[in-house]
Image: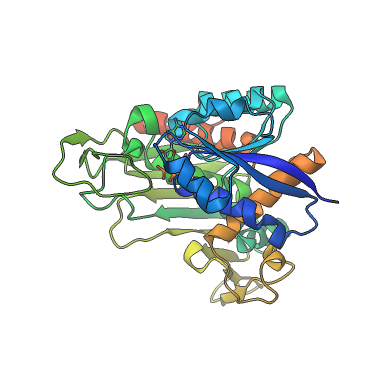
Amino acid sequence: MVDTLGVAVVGFGWMGRVHTQAYARVLHHYPKLGLRPELVTVADEVPGRAEEAAGQFGFATAVRDWREVADDPRVRAVSITAPNFLHREIGVAMAEAGKHVWIEKPVGLTLADARAVADAVTTAGVQGAVGFNYRNAPAVESARQLIGSGAIGTVTHVRVRLFSDYAAHPEGALTWRYERERGGSGVLGDLASHGVDLARYLLGDIASLTADTAVFVPERARPTGATAGHLRASGGELGPVENEDYVNCLLRFDSGARGVLEACRVSVGEQNNYGFEVHGTKGAVFWDFRRMNELGVSRGDRYQDQPVSTVYVGPGEGEYGAFQPGSANAMGYDDLKVIEACRFLRSIAEGTAHGATLTDAVHSAAALEAMVRSAESGAWVDVHRAG
Ligand SMILES: NC(=O)c1ccc[n+]([C@@H]2O[C@H](COP(=O)([O-])OP(=O)(O)OC[C@H]3O[C@@H](n4cnc5c(N)ncnc54)[C@H](O)[C@@H]3O)[C@@H](O)[C@H]2O)c1
């Protein structure tokens, strides 16, 4: 007997679509989950967008105002995939209405926003999952296990990179992402938030950091109609880009390890170049999102000239076995969201958290806030005291 769980999606852009597809697929990959998500309602403020989503994916109803979702007793869990400036208001309202929330990173505009959603979820006693999907890659889980087992010795340093060209085109429209009021930070919230989560997932908490930021494309054309994703706009009125395109950051971890995190949204020639290199006293682990199911591993006792092997993750590593029967069959980005959906639903079914939570979002937001302060002052900033 499989119980059903009424779910809703608020904000039907790229992430709204991906969350919906994950709900639709989750039982295909996790037949023993014991909870069947039922697509109850979808909300989007753009006229017709929610109706179109309902027609394509089978939501029972479509609305324009997310408040109707909060008031809908059929809905027990909500995906919050609207722009960052709405995360706090919608997240708090949904938790207060007793709904479990699966909310996209960075969870609001600031550390205070992330904390407000986390507090509301705790007070309401509901589950709160966050879209830090890269930690769900089986190869990343495998890397974490390797590091934890001591296979590469004591971790000394890490490099985390997130380079993308999604904002590189000078005609890229001035959407909510480039405004302080609606996007908050720029590449910090968009990409560095993932980098902080990966760094913490692999190496533990960050103690302090120093950062530098820059805007490389200072003006963009305002879009003339509704937006979703990264569209182009040319010829329109120009407006200022209000948040950073680039960040580089030096990290000190509680463990004593050191790190470098660099993220850029305007890197010509870089498409989703996300990954890390973790070095230890006896070995190293390398991961590149573009070859998501491969892990570079150097281990042994040679120290110098030690070879690096390419390992294809397989069943038994992370959640790989839920997707493919044998190693070297590719998984993709959307599969990471199916894993996230599974962990969210499992958290609800068992009443205990699985996967990235709002606590992780608060940690990430604290590091981002420390980066902002450091970029302003030029000083090292203690992450634990940030905010
Ligand atoms: N985890 C990831 O890898 C990842 C990737 C991309 C985006 N994100 C996050 O997901 C969120 C959404 O990003 P996106 O790329 O899907 O953006 P998007 O612009 O493609 O979609 C946002 C959607 O929200 C809708 N919306 C705006 N105001 C609304 C309101 N008041 N009520 C209901 N709907 C409203 C818009 O009409 C649009 O359809 C952001 O917080 C972003 O940081 C996460």
> Which x, y percent locates residue 73?
69, 29
Q: How is the image coloured?
A: rainbow
> Which x, y percent locates residue 287?
53, 63
> Regarding ligand 1, which quadrant of the image does it lie in?
top left
Using the image as rendered, state which of residue 9 and residue 266 is in the foreground: 9
To which quarter of the image does residue 349 belong? top right
Q: Residue furthest left?
A: 235
Using the image as rendered, state which of residue 80 and residue 367 is in the foreground: 80
Image mark count: 0
Whether residue 367 sits left or right of residue 102 in the image: it is left
- Residue 330, relative to residue 34: is it above or below? below
> Which x, y percent locates residue 263?
40, 49
> Which x, y percent locates residue 242?
28, 33
The answer to whether any part of residue 257 appears in the image is: no
Residue displayed at 66% across by 67% down: 323
- Residue 276, relative to residue 14: is it above or below? below
To which quarter of the image does residue 216 belong? top left
Whether residue 147 sits left or right of residue 252 in the image: it is right
The answer to whether any part of residue 18 appears in the image is: yes
Residue displayed at 57% across by 72% down: 330
Using the image as rendered, state which of residue 228 and residue 257 is in the foreground: 228
